[in-house]
Image: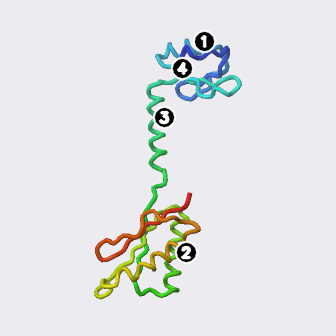
Amino acid sequence: MINEQIRDREVRLVGENGEQLGIMPAKDALKLAKDAELDLVKIAPTAKPPVCKIIDYGKYRYELARKEKEAKKKQKVIEVKEVRLSPNIDDNDLNTKINAARKFIEKGNKVKVTLRFRGREMAHMFKSKYILDDFAEKLADIATVDKPAKVEGRSIVLFLTAKR
């Protein structure tokens, strides 16, 4: 609330430089604000008595908008982490890769599982698709398949995301 919208009888007034001006009637506080060619803004409405401050309201709104923008910048961005496999991977190596993917998913990241083929392995691409199926099945307790396995050039790609 600003200026005439403040209906309280008494308010605790804070000056434009942050100094305490004490408890006074709202009309006197409004007069002080008008004399300084600034606005009287209620900044703590639940306090007893409410706290009002003499400030430039336009500048105050701009500062709030800037703080909100800063808060948005600090939001966590979901990263896509990649786990690369080969078609002749052994069970223990596969379990190591699954544990790495599990850590990524628990941190809230998406996981891109890539099964890469080289040379003659290209002739047997779809015989190796079971590796990706096993990978997704072993992480089914914490992850869901975001995009099913798809051939992209010399590899098959699968995307996993955390369950909600």
The image quadrant of residue 48 is top right
As measured in the structure, the alpha-carbon distance from the residue carrying label 2 to the one carrying label 1 is 71 Å
Q: Which mark is residue 49?
A: none
Horizontal side of 12 relative to 60 (left or right) equals right
Pair 2/1: label in front: 2
N-terminal label among 2 and 4: 4
Given the image, on which type of amino acid does mark 3 rest?
Leu
Q: What residue is disc 2 on?
A: 138
Pair 3/1: label in front: 3
The image quadrant of residue 24 is top right
Pair 4/1: label in front: 4
Q: What residue is disc 1 on?
A: 28
N-terminal label among 2 and 1: 1
Given the image, on which type of amino acid does mark 4 rest?
Ile
Measured as percent of width and height from the top left, residue 98 is found at: 51, 76
Given the image, on which type of amino acid does mark 1 rest?
Asp
